[in-house]
């Protein structure tokens, strides 16, 4: 998607107000919307996230800390980062009620899906003010 932005081409869907969940789900079993859907490590997307945030992305869900550049972009454009619990993919998938591929179907598990969720278990780690729950947690235990 960042390559499309660099080329001045339109994205396959409007990012405005959207939340991206960094996940590579397993295939669904019959009757399920999606297979196991645990978060992937977010820092692998840190090179790309600021450009997407600038285009209107309002949130990301994954696991692990984000770079200073991503946090700065979130502050500037009022976006947030949520953490989901790694290793809980089977449980998280029960919160996903509907999943449909909207872009890059040829990428299989890496395709972009529109997810409909209910009571999705995630915690705000980085808010629009630059607060960082991971850093705050470390400080509590260093005293």
Image (tube, rainbow, N blue to C red):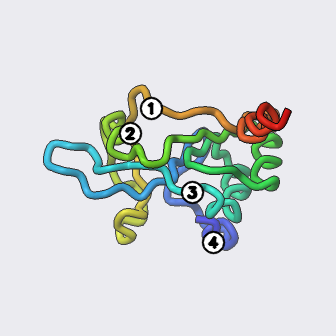
**Mark pair 4, 2: CA separation:** 31 Å
Query: Residue at coordinates 78% horizontally, 49% vertically from top-left?
Result: 73
Residue ID for mark 2: 92
Q: Nearer the viewer, residue 88 or 4?
A: 88
Residue density around tag 2, few if under 14, some if 14–19, many if 20 or more, within 10 Å: many
Residue density around tag 4, few if under 14, some if 14–19, many if 20 or more, within 10 Å: few
Q: Quadrant of the C terminus?
A: top right
Could you tell me which secondary element the residue under label 3 belongs to? Answer: loop
**Mark pair 1, 4: CA separation:** 30 Å
Residue ID for mark 1: 120
Kindly give the residue lying farthest to the top in the view shown.
119
Q: Is residue 95 above or below residue 73?
A: above
Residue 106 occupies quadrant: bottom left
Residue ID for mark 4: 3
User: Where does residue 32 sit, x and y in percent of width and height?
Assistant: 21, 43
Label 2 with label 1: CB-CB less than 8 Å = yes
Residue ID for mark 3: 41
Label 1 with label 4: CB-CB less than 8 Å = no
Could you tell me which secondary element the residue under label 4 belongs to? Answer: helix
Residue 9 occupies quadrant: bottom right
Q: Nearer the viewer, residue 2 or 30?
A: 30
Label 1 with label 3: CB-CB less than 8 Å = no
């Amino acid at each position: 998607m960042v390559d499309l932005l660099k080329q001045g081409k339109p994205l396959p869907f409007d990012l405005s107000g959207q939340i991206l969940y960094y996940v590579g789900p397993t295939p669904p079993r019959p009757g399920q919307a999606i297979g196991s859907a645990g978060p992937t490590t977010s820092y692998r997307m840190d090179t790309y996230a600021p450009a997407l945030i600038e285009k209107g992305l309002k949130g990301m869900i994954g696991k692990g800390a984000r770079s200073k550049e991503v946090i700065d972009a979130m502050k500037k454009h009022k976006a947030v980062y949520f953490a989901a619990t790694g290793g809980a993919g089977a449980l998280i998938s029960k919160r996903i009620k509907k999943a449909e591929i909207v872009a890059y179907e040829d990428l299989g598990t890496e395709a972009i899906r529109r997810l409909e969720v209910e009571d999705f278990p995630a915690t705000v780690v980085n808010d629009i003010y630059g607060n960082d729950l991971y850093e705050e947690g470390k400080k509590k235990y260093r005293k």
